[in-house]
Amino acid sequence: MRVIGRGSANVLIDYGDPKWLWRCCIRWPDLLSLNNAYTIKNIHYIKERVEPLLDGLICPMELLDVDVDFIRPVLSTFISNLDEKVVKVIKIKNLIDKNTTNLIQDEHFLKYYCSGSFQSILLELKPKWLYYDTDYCRNCTHNALKGREAKYCYSLLLMNPSHLKTFFGDCNMYPDKFKAAMLEYLLNDSNVFKVLYDLQKKLAESTTSIKNLRSANDVEDDLLLLMTLRDVSCFIEWKSGENNLRVHIIDVDLKPKKKWTHWVKTENQLESSRKISHISNK
Ligand SMILES: [Zn+2]
């Protein structure tokens, strides 16, 4: 058993089954029971609120009880007091198959994996804010604020699929069939970026905007859902010989309301920073 991924809120554990992974919440590093309670709330939120919106796109996942003693050697690094007998974990399908494990490009919001012979390629990406109601691009401006030099923008990609060229860069290693399949997918109106854009737009127009928040009580359920949809990860998989791309979404967790102060702080920083309407216009 080993940890193969770690964020501030979750760890991803390879427990020996190549097809599935365990995802454990570590938002509360002091007490397992708080993480367990959140995981139960989170899986209900995902199944009831998020999954129906992203019909067929959510990666298969289910709630599972794991004996604390079984997982203790790994989890005790992240949670100091394992105060319950079971750990509530989310069992999630492993989207990186055993043949597609070469990581050939690794950027902040974009990773490319491939098989040795480029017969299969997997993109892992975070589209972030595809819809924004400012006169500058939220993603490009936020990247600049953070000092990240991203050459690509998912919002621009949605509007202009020919921006895909920037994603491939000067690399000639990707098969033409893969590039053609990606372009065709982006030209399809039901691609994952368009689906997320439409949902983000609808929710942004119907809920209180971040700049108007004054307390946690102002954070509506729709705003939490919007913040979830602004932070998902997408996996796009291409296999030589298959016509369709396989697309899955993960990282669809419920955001704690207490994060509202962080959201407001970021908005204020963006408002007073150098505004960018897409990276190419810099
Ligand atoms: Zn942009």
Image: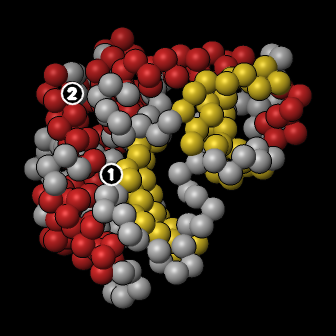
Question: Closer to the N terminus: mark 2 or mark 1?
Answer: 1
Q: Is residue 215 visible?
A: no
Q: Nearer the viewer, residue 276 or 221?
A: 221
Residue 61: image quadrant is top right
Q: Say if mark 2 contacts mark 1, CB within 8 Å.
A: no
Relative image position of residue 146 (x, y in whole percent)? 40, 58
- The percent position of residue 73, horizontal first and vertical second, equals 87, 39
Q: Residue furthest top?
A: 217
Residue 35 spot, x, y in % from top left: 66, 23
Horizontal side, residue 263 vs residue 165: left or right: right
Tell me the residue at 45%/63% (across/down): 122
Q: What amino acid type should be assigned to the residue bearing mark 2?
A: Leu
Q: Amino acid at mark 1?
A: Pro
Residue at the spot x=20%, y=64% of the render? Answer: 184
- Position above or below: 114 against 98: below
The answer to which quarter of the image holds residue 182 is bottom left
User: Where 151 sits versus 56, above or below?
Assistant: below
Cα–Cα span, label 2 and label 1: 17 Å
The answer as to whether callout 1 falls within 8 Å of ligand 1 is no
Mark 2 surroundings: few (<14), some (14-19) or many (≥20) residues within 10 A? some
Q: Which residue is mark 2?
A: 203
Q: Secondary structure at mark 1?
A: loop
Residue 249 visible from this viewpoint: yes
Residue at horizontal 57%, vertical 27%?
Answer: 62
Quarter of the figure with residue 249 = top left
Q: How is the image coloured?
A: secondary structure
Left or right of 182, for residue 277:
left
Q: Residue at x 16, y 29 (%)?
A: 202
The image quadrant where one finds the C terminus is bottom left
**Element assignment for label 2:** helix
Image coordinates of residue 117 in percent, x first then y, are 52, 81
In the picture, the disc for residue 127 is 1
